[in-house]
Each structure stands twice: as structure tokens, then as C-alpha cells.
Amino acid sequence: MTVSLPDISLTETSPTLSPLRWVGMQGIDLPLTVSEPGYRRELHARGDVQVDLPAPHIKGIHMSRLYRLLDDLGDGEALSPVGLRRCLQAIVESHRDCNTSSARMRLQFDLLARRQALVTKGLAGWKSYPVRLDATLRPGSFSKQGFFTLRAQVTVGYSSTCPCSAALTRQLIEQGFTRAFAGQPSVEVSEVADWLRRHATLATPHSQRSEAVVGVDVAAGAPDMGLLTLIDRIEQAVGTPVQTAVKRADEQAFAALNGQNLMFVEDAVRRIQAALTVGYAQPLVHVRHLESLHPHDAVAWAAPAAEGVLA
């Protein structure tokens, strides 16, 4: 027997008649397939999706329609700007009876990438990169399909060694060496080598795990999100990405990288900004050094002149 179920979103009116900017859902679990050159993987994501509700007399939107259309993103088709736009367009169309003209979604997931050790052949491990995608479709005066924007944000971990601390450390080692060999007209190389082997860590510069949060615009017609390419560009810029599986030779190589890439937080953000000047639109960079000297962090932002800081 078929029973007509009540739908009070259609039969009742809100006690307060006012338009609403966004209405929807947050924290929806879904699988997503990320495919880029040399990479394809199904990942667990969480999605937020909302529409505008400009009609003051409409009591509520159709939440189930949002859920089902967002769920279609997990049907195995690789994530792409074209696919996200198509999904948002379908969401707007599904809410024409609410006078909806805009829709937005946010997708958050961890991109897993296999990273090789610095030196040891055949040694590798998995590294996780938090990703956030923000897509919006608004009415456009030049397109019936609306104005689509898409931004990708990635978080990349790296190590930073303080240049000031390194300079102070070198001074202490120099003073220790001078005291050890004061008054000697000459010193054998072997004696210097032996002293360094025992005393070169008389003082050590402080270093810390750090992170860069970088957001860029993604072209609406791009074949994929370009996430790994962006991550690689950032890691190359800082020069000291955190490692996964290591042996002693890899740990030594990492120590050498840190010694050759001393950086303040200002240096790190400028390096990344410079690395993104070609091929990326509206890059916003936020770096954070989780200080080992202080109980607080050192931070810096870089953005196009007309933009604010990255939240």
C-alpha cells in the first residue's frame, strides 16, 4: 500500500520570512578517486555542500538531493574540475523550486604518496598530504552555466634549521677549537679531524618540524587538480621535506640538506612564493615553524598584493 508522506518543507511556511545565504550539509563521508600522471588512488574524503536560499517563503531545502548528488562524485570517476562543475550545476538545477542560483562544496582528504628515501635504494614509505578543495558556482552574466571557481589547498611538512642559531653554534665551535689549539704554531690535519669528530657538536643549531599551507586557483578546464605537481614544487622550494622510511645514510643526507638550507620563516615563505610565480594563479602561502626554542610558533604569509592572508 502506498502512503503519501508529509513534506512540511513544502506545506509549511517559516515563521520568519528572510532569505538565507547558504544552507546545506557538512561532514559527509565519501570515497573519491584522485588520478594524476603516475598516480591513481581511491581516498576517503569528507564533503560539505550548500546552496543559497533566496526565497524567504521557502521553509527548507531538499537535503537528500544534495546528499545524492554529492554521492555521485564517489562513483569511480576521477576527480576533475569539469566533474565538480557538473555536480554543482546539477545541485543548482535540483533546487530551482527554491529559487536557488548558487552552490558550493568543500572536499577534504589526505593525499597518500609513496616517497623514496634520500639515499637507500628500494627504501620508501607513505606520506600524507592534507588537501582541501573549494568549488563554487554562482550566477554569471556571460554564461548560462554560471561562474565557476575552484581553489586547491595543500599542506606540506618540512624541516627548518634556524640561521641565527647556526651562526651562534659556529661561533661556539670556533671558540672551542681556538682554546684547544691555542699557542700551537701548526696543527696536523689528523688532529683537526679528531677534534671535530669529538667536539663538532659542542653546540647544535635548533631545528623544527614545519609546515606550509598553500592555496592556488585551479583552471576550470584543467584535466586534473595538479595536486602532486604543486606538492613537488613546494618540497623542491624548501629543500628539506620530512622523510618517511630512513636508514642511517638517509638520516645523514637529511642532516646535510638541513645544514645547506638554513631558513627563517621569512625565507621559507619567500622561497615558496617564488617557486609558484609561473604556472599558478593567485597563490596564497602560509608557513609555520613549530619552534623548538620557544613555546610559540613563528609564522609568515605571502599573497598577491590585492589579497589578504590565508586563513
Image (cartoon, rainbow, N blue to C red):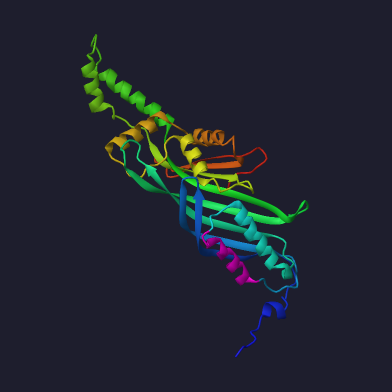
- Of the pair 18 and 293, the residue shown nearer to us: 18
Q: Position of residue 67 (x, y in %)?
A: 58, 68
Q: Position of residue 222 (x, y in %)?
A: 60, 46
Q: Image quarter for residue 186?
A: top left
Main SS of residues in magenta? helix
Q: Position of residue 77 (x, y in %)?
A: 54, 58
- Of the pair 76 and 202, the residue shown nearer to us: 76
Quick one: quadrant of the N terminus?
Answer: bottom right
Q: Residue at x 50, y 64 (%)?
A: 29
Q: Position of residue 238 (x, y in %)?
A: 46, 35
Q: Residue at x 68, y 56 (%)?
A: 137
Magenta stretch holds residue 65: yes
Q: Residue at x 57, y 64 (%)?
A: 72
**Residue at the far bottom in the pictured view:** 1
Marks counted in the figure total 0
- Of the pair 190 and 235, the residue shown nearer to us: 235
Taking 43 as reference, is 293 above or below it?
A: above
Taking 241 as reference, is 152 above or below it?
A: below
Left-right relation of 44 to 63: left
- Of the pair 186 and 62, the residue shown nearer to us: 62
- Asked whether the viewer can see residue 95, the reply is yes
- Asked whether the viewer can see residue 311, the reply is no
**Residue at the far top in the pictured view:** 185
Q: Image quarter for residue 248?
A: top left
**Residue at the far right in the pictured view:** 141
Q: The magenta stretch spans which residues? A: 62-76
Magenta stretch holds residue 30: no
Left-right relation of 268 to 304: left
